[in-house]
């Protein structure tokens, strides 16, 4: 059965499918999965990537939001006992329900509409430590923001937060011609490998967000807006030999960690 003959692509879900077998195989290889791996795929689509994952992984649980694909996918995988298709929105489902499908830690592989990639990544960073590696197709521009380094135009909240929790790497660039329907931008495959013993802290996220709140302002001014006292900030800067004129985009991820810890400890002591 050809999916294109039985399904009209849904623009509301931002569907862009891949059929090139070499690219599908490359995505699976980039993810680092093995024959012992359990994989959560988000965005089954036409099932081409699902099938490629299933050729290597021990088990694939794939979520698809579009109910119109139910019959197509059921027929495609009816004789494949390694693949389980669930029609539902993984972004809205409880993490406990999703993880009930897995016996232990698992990998995530996803080719999703760009507008939900960041919420999806943060859902799994915030709510679980069992998703050890996330390999996801994102807009090339977003990938460049994720791996950006200090003092570059793309460095910001996404760069700091994802580098804090994960080792980040762009594994390959994917040209827009590789998709159907063809999107307006190129994509990139990015691999996020969770760092051990680094747990999600919403206070740290709020702190980093506040540091970048007004990019034209100095970090000192942004921290004052967050409610820290000027003397406390100056002392924390002195501990790291930071200039009072420095801006957030010039700090390393380690600088952010140390600064947050120092300011929070000082707040507790006062």
Image (cartoon, rainbow, N blue to C red):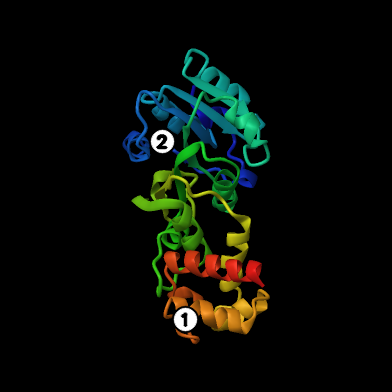
Q: Which residue is drawn at 54% across and 83% down?
A: 234
Q: Which residue is drawn at 37% across and 32% down?
A: 33
Of the residues under marks 1 and 2, which one precedes in the sequence? 2
Expressed as whole percent of the image width and height from the top left, the position of residue 146 reads 45, 59
Q: Quadrant of residue 38?
A: top left
Residue 63 got which mark?
none
Q: Can residue 185 be seen in this view?
A: no
Q: How many marks?
A: 2
Expressed as whole percent of the image width and height from the top left, the position of residue 267 reads 64, 70
* Placement of 210 over or under 219, stated as above or below: above
* Placement of 164 over or under 31, stated as above or below: below
Q: Is residue 182 visible?
A: yes
* Placement of 77 over or under 243, stated as above or below: above
- In the image, farthest residue toward the bottom: 245
Residue 19 got which mark?
2
The secondary element bearing badge 1 is classed as helix
Expressed as whole percent of the image width and height from the top left, the position of residue 141 reads 45, 61
Q: Do the residues labelled 1 and 2 touch (CB within 8 Å)?
A: no
Residue at numbered disc 1: 238
Classed neighbour count for the residue bearing mark 1: other residues with Cα under 10 Å, few (<14), some (14–19), many (≥20): few
Q: Distance between the residues labelled 1 and 2?
A: 55 Å
The secondary element bearing badge 2 is classed as loop
Q: Residue at x 36, y 25 (%)?
A: 56
Q: Which residue is drawn at 35% across and 36% down?
A: 32
Closest to the observer, 124 or 113: 124
In the figure, is residue 266 to the left or right of 130?
A: right
Expressed as whole percent of the image width and height from the top left, the position of residue 186 reads 42, 55
Q: Nearer the viewer, mark 1 or mark 2?
A: 1
Closest to the observer, 267 or 210: 267
In the figure, is residue 125 to the left or right of 241?
A: right
């Amino acid at each position: 059965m050809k999916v294109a003959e039985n399904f009209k692509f849904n623009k509301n879900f931002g569907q862009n499918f891949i059929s090139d077998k070499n690219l599908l195989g490359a995505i699976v290889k980039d993810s680092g999965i093995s024959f012992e791996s359990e994989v959560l795929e988000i965005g089954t689509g036409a099932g081409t990537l699902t099938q490629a994952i299933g050729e290597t992984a021990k088990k694939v649980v794939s979520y698809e939001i579009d109910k119109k694909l139910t019959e197509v996918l059921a027929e495609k995988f009816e004789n494949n006992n390694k693949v389980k298709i669930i029609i539902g929105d993984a972004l809205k489902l409880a993490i406990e329900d999703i993880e009930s499908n897995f016996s232990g830690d698992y990998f995530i592989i996803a080719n999703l509409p760009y507008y939900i990639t960041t919420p999806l990544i943060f859902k799994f960073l915030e709510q679980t430590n069992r998703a050890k590696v996330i390999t996801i197709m994102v807009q090339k521009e977003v990938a460049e923001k994720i791996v950006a380094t200090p003092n570059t135009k793309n460095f910001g909240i996404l760069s700091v937060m994802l580098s804090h929790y994960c080792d980040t790497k762009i594994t390959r660039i994917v040209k827009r011609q590789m998709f159907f329907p063809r999107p307006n931008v190129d994509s990139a495959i990015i691999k996020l490998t969770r760092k051990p013993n680094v747990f999600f802290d919403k206070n740290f996220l709020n702190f980093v967000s506040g540091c970048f709140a007004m990019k034209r302002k100095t970090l000192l001014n942004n921290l004052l807006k967050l409610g820290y006292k000027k003397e406390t900030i100056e002392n924390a800067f002195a501990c790291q030999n930071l200039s009072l004129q420095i801006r957030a985009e010039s700090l390393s991820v380690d600088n952010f960690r140390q600064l947050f810890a120092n300011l929070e400890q000082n707040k507790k002591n006062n």
